[in-house]
Image (cartoon, rainbow, N blue to C red):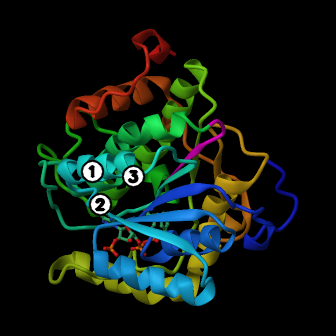
Amino acid sequence: MAHNKKWTQHDIPSQTGKRALITGANSGIGLHTAMELAGKGAQVILACRDEAKALQAMALIRQQHPKASLHFLQLDLGSLASVHAMAEMFLEQYDRLDLLINNAGVMWLPQTKTEDGFEAHMGINHLGHFALTGLLLPALLKQPGSRIITVSSIAHRAGDLNFDDLFFEHRPYGRQKAYGQSKLANLVFARELERRLNAAGSQTLSVAVHPGVSNTNLAMPRHESSSAFLVASLASILSPLIGQSPLKGALPTLYAATATDIRGGDYLGPNGFYEAYGYPAPASSTRRSRNPEIARKLWDISEQLTAVVYPFEKDQAVA
Ligand SMILES: NC(=O)c1ccc[n+]([C@@H]2O[C@H](COP(=O)([O-])OP(=O)(O)OC[C@H]3O[C@@H](n4cnc5c(N)ncnc54)[C@H](OP(=O)(O)O)[C@@H]3O)[C@@H](O)[C@H]2O)c1
């Protein structure tokens, strides 16, 4: 990618005729991604767990872009039944998809399980998106040049995928560990998906991004009592001081979704100190995130756990 200039939302080319589905589009980075894409003429589907919040977000977008083409689909990534229901509804209503933006996420929750019994970070941040992407793939494959953008984090660097105990059932739970593991899974998934798409001769691209540190609702204390509340409270106080705006945080996603010099497998983040803030540029990642054995294991276990099997031949999966 060309990153010798300060790319901003003003550089987004017209998105007229494109359809984008964004998970978690009612808040933070997802909301600003939706705002900018809709402002450039894309039809935007806000896939959110809370309809009232989605409607509020749509009203906010329409204040700035009265002609915005916006739609809502209910999606709880912590429920495979909900993921299936949303994907079915999408495929009934629409024929094709240009942009799937796997953005929704949770951070630093106390130990919690999803409806399907998955550890919540792994279940919502990775497995929900793995299932959603697999189910929507037919609509993406129909559209040459379509893109799947998955939002990871600097926190992937501290992440480790423990395949013997992905859900912290036999080791002490740690909020940062659980978040880091899920964000490493996001990055590994995005790259492995690109490898498989490429091997299958598909023109759909898979790209990963991270927003640096951005002042959103992510660190808002949502869980009372316990040390998690203190950590989250501190983070929510510090976040406006050290974090960049949610719009700035959305720039790597917007670049990945709309720039012409994107290649499948790219990983983008802000170009400033520690990649915490700045303008979109290639991002650094850990050796673990590029390990093909880890990628294969994650893929296999994700297919087993979600029962969503991608339409790739088995031999295309061999590195
Ligand atoms: N902000 C940062 O500094 C930062 C840094 C690195 C990575 N990220 C990543 O950026 C992405 C966006 O986060 P953000 O900072 O914009 O946080 P945010 O403002 O809290 O937005 C998160 C979005 O995810 C949605 N969500 C949470 N659980 C969900 C579920 N079970 N099903 C469907 N949607 C769900 C939230 O819905 P509700 O509003 O209903 O809760 C919200 O719309 C996340 O993947 C996060 O890991 C953020």
Ligand 1 closer than 8 Å to label 2 CB? yes
User: Could you tell whether 226 is left or right of 176 in the image?
Assistant: left
**Contact between labelled residues 2 and 1, with CB atoms less than 8 Å apart:** yes
Tell me which label, 2 or 3, sits earlier in the chain. Answer: 2
Which SS class for mark 3?
helix
Closer to the eye: label 2 or 3: 3
User: Could you tell whether 172 is left or right of 38 in the image?
Assistant: left
Q: Amino acid at mark 1?
A: Val
Residue 148 on the magenta span = yes
Q: Quadrant of residue 212?
A: bottom right
Q: Is residue 306 above or below residue 104?
A: above
Q: Residue furthest right?
A: 4
Disc 1 from disc 3: Cα separation: 15 Å
The residue under the point 62% across, 87% down is 64
Q: Amino acid at mark 2?
A: Leu
* Residue 75: numbered disc: 2
Disc 1 from disc 2: Cα separation: 6 Å
Residue 99 locus on image (x, y percent): 56, 51
Q: Which residues are magenta?
A: 144-151
> Considering depth in this image, is 62 or 205 the residue closer to the camera?
62
Tell me which label, 1 or 2, sits earlier in the chain. Answer: 2
User: Could you tell whether 87 is left or right of 247 in the image?
Assistant: left
- Disc 2 residue crowd, few under 14, some 14–19, many 20+, Cα 10 Å: many
Residue 240 locus on image (x, y percent): 52, 88
